[in-house]
Image (cartoon, rainbow, N blue to C red):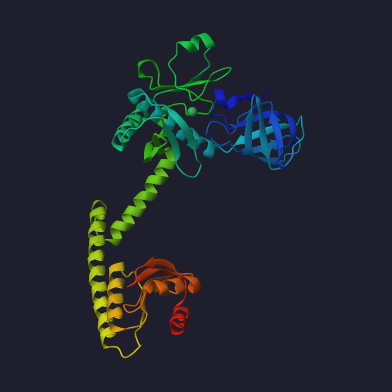
C-alpha cells in the first residue's frame, strides 16, 4: 500500500521514496509502485500527475507518464523500467498540478454555492487539461442564476478562506452534512472550504486542493447548456481563466479595430452589417436574374437552353430563371447553380413534355437527386458542367 502524501500535503513537489514493485502493464508500458507518493493518480474526473523519478544510485531520470489506482494499489506508468528496491527522488510537474488544484478547488466552491442555494448536486465532473472544466448538475437554473452563483463564488475567493482536509470516523460522519457523488467504503476524506460560520462547502474528495481560496484567483463560467435533465456548466479558474479571458479580449479588440469602433459597439455593428449584406445580396441577385432573363429572351436558337450560374443564388431566383427558359424553349431546358467542385442545384424540365421523365434519366445516368412535377423537376446533381451539357446533347 502506497502512502499518499498528496492527500495531507498537496504542496510537496519533491520527495524521496523507494520503488516497492515493478512490472509491465497490458499495453506493454513499464510501471512501478512507490512506498510513498506525491503523484495523484487518475481519479474522480481528474488526470494523473506527471513528473520525473531520478534514480539515486545512477542519477538517471525516468518520466512518470500516468498513474492508476486500484483499491490501495497505485501503479505509475514510466518512460523506462526501473529496478525494484531503488531509491528515487520524485519531482512533480508542479505547474500542471497547481493548475488542476486551482480548477478543482474552484469547482468545489461553485458547486457548493449552487448546492447551498438550490439543493442540486454535481453528478458529473471532468477536469480537462485542454478545454474547460465541466460540472453536471441534476437540476436546472438559468444562465443568469449561474452568473449570480459565479459572483458569490468569486466573493469566497476574495475572502481568502482556508481549505482543509479531514478524515472523520464513521460515527462522526453521520452528523456531518457533506456532498458526495457516491457511497464510499472505508475512510472518507472531506474537503472543507471555509470554517465555522463561514463554511461554504464540505465535500468528499480524493484530489489535491489549494490551501486558501485566494489562490484560485478567479472563477469564470464559460458556458451553460441543458444536459440530461439538468445543466452542464463549463468553467475555468486561476491562470487558465486569465489566459481564456486574454484570448477572448484579443479577439474582441481585433474585431473592434477591424470595424473601426469601440468593443461595446461590436455586436450592434455586426448585426447592422449582416442586415446590409442581406439587402445588397437581394439587390445583386435581382439584377443578375434580370440580366440572365434578358439574355434568354434575346438568345438565338438553342444557345441558352442550359444556363450555368455560380454563387449563392436564392432558390426563388433559380426558379424564375427556369420559368423564363421554359417559356422560351419547347424541349428540355435547365438552370444549374453551383460549381464543378461542389455540384449544382438545378431546376429543369419542359412545358411541352413530362419533366418527370427527364428526372428519371438524370437520376439513372448522372445520379441526380430530387423530384418534381410534369412542369419542372428540381434537386441536386454531383456532376461537372461538361458532363451535364453532354447529357442534354445526347437526350
Ligand atoms: Zn473534488
Spot occupied by residue 343 in the image (x, y as percentages of width and height): 44, 71
Q: In this orientation, which residue lies closer to the viewer: 60 or 210? A: 210
Q: Is residue 130 above or below residue 205?
A: below
Which residue is rendered at x = 38% and y = 22% of the image? 200
Measuring from the top left, give residue 274's x and y in whole percent: 26, 61
**Residue at the image position 32 percent from the left and 54 percent from the top:** 253
* Residue 235 sits in quarter: top left
User: Does any portion of residue 309 appear in the rendered image?
Assistant: no
Task: Please give left or right for residue 241 compared with residue 100 in the image.
Answer: left
Q: Which of the 4 quarters of the picture holds residue 16?
A: top right
Q: Nearer the viewer, residue 116 or 103?
A: 116
Q: Nearer the viewer, residue 345 or 36?
A: 345
Q: Quadrant of the C terminus?
A: bottom left
Report the number of discs.
0
Q: Looking at this rendering, what residue extends furthest in the bottom direction? A: 300
Q: Position of residue 254 (x, y in %)?
A: 33, 57
| Residue 320 shows up from this direction | yes
Query: Residue at the top extreme?
Result: 171
Q: Residue at x 29, y 36 (%)?
A: 144
**Residue closest to the eye, 68 or 59:** 68
Quarter of the figure with residue 358 = bottom left
Identify the image quadrant of the N terminus: top right
Amino acid at each position: 500500500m502506497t502512502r499518499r502524501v498528496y492527500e495531507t500535503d498537496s504542496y510537496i513537489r519533491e520527495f524521496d521514496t523507494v520503488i516497492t514493485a515493478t512490472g509491465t502493464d497490458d499495453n506493454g508500458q513499464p510501471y512501478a509502485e512507490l512506498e510513498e507518493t506525491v503523484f495523484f493518480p487518475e481519479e474522480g474526473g481528474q488526470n494523473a500527475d506527471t513528473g520525473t523519478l531520478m534514480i539515486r544510485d545512477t542519477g538517471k531520470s525516468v518520466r512518470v507518464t500516468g498513474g492508476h489506482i486500484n483499491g490501495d494499489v497505485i501503479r505509475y506508468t514510466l518512460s523506462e523500467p526501473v529496478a525494484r528496491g531503488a531509491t528515487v527522488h520524485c519531482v512533480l510537474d508542479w505547474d500542471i498540478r497547481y493548475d488542476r488544484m486551482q480548477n478543482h478547488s474552484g469547482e468545489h466552491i461553485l458547486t457548493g454555492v449552487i448546492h447551498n442555494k438550490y439543493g442540486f448536486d454535481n453528478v458529473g465532473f471532468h477536469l480537462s487539461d485542454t478545454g474547460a472544466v465541466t460540472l453536471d448538475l441534476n437540476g436546472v437554473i438559468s444562465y443568469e442564476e449561474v452568473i449570480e452563483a459565479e459572483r458569490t463564488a468569486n466573493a469566497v475567493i476574495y475572502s481568502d478562506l482556508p481549505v482543509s482536509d479531514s478524515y472523520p470516523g464513521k460515527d462522526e460522519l453521520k452528523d456531518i452534512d457533506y456532498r458526495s457523488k457516491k457511497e464510499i467504503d472505508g475512510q472518507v476524506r472531506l474537503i472543507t472550504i471555509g470554517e465555522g460560520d463561514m463554511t461554504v462547502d464540505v465535500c468528499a474528495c480524493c484530489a489535491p486542493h489549494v490551501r486558501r481560496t485566494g489562490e484560485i484567483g478567479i472563477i469564470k463560467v464559460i458556458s451553460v447548456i441543458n444536459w440530461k435533465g439538468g445543466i452542464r456548466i463549463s468553467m475555468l479558474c486561476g491562470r487558465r481563466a486569465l489566459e481564456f479571458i486574454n484570448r477572448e479580449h484579443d479577439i474582441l479588440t481585433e474585431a473592434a479595430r477591424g470595424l473601426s469602433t469601440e468593443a461595446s459597439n461590436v455586436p450592434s455593428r455586426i448585426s447592422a452589417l449582416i442586415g446590409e449584406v442581406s439587402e445588397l445580396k437581394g439587390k445583386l441577385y435581382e439584377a443578375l436574374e434580370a440580366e440572365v432573363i434578358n439574355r434568354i429572351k434575346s438568345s438565338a436558337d438553342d444557345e441558352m437552353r442550359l444556363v450555368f450560374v455560380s454563387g449563392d443564388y436564392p432558390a426563388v431566383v433559380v426558379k424564375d430563371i427556369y420559368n423564363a427558359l421554359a417559356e422560351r424553349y419547347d424541349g428540355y431546358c435547365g438552370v444549374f447553380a453551383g460549381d464543378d467542385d461542389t455540384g449544382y442545384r438545378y431546376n429543369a424540365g419542359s412545358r411541352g413534355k413530362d419533366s418527370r421523365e427527364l428526372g428519371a434519366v438524370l437520376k439513372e445516368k448522372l445520379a441526380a437527386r430530387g423530384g418534381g412535377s410534369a412542369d419542372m423537376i428540381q434537386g441536386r446533381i454531383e456532376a461537372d458542367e461538361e458532363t451535364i451539357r453532354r447529357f442534354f446533347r445526347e437526350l
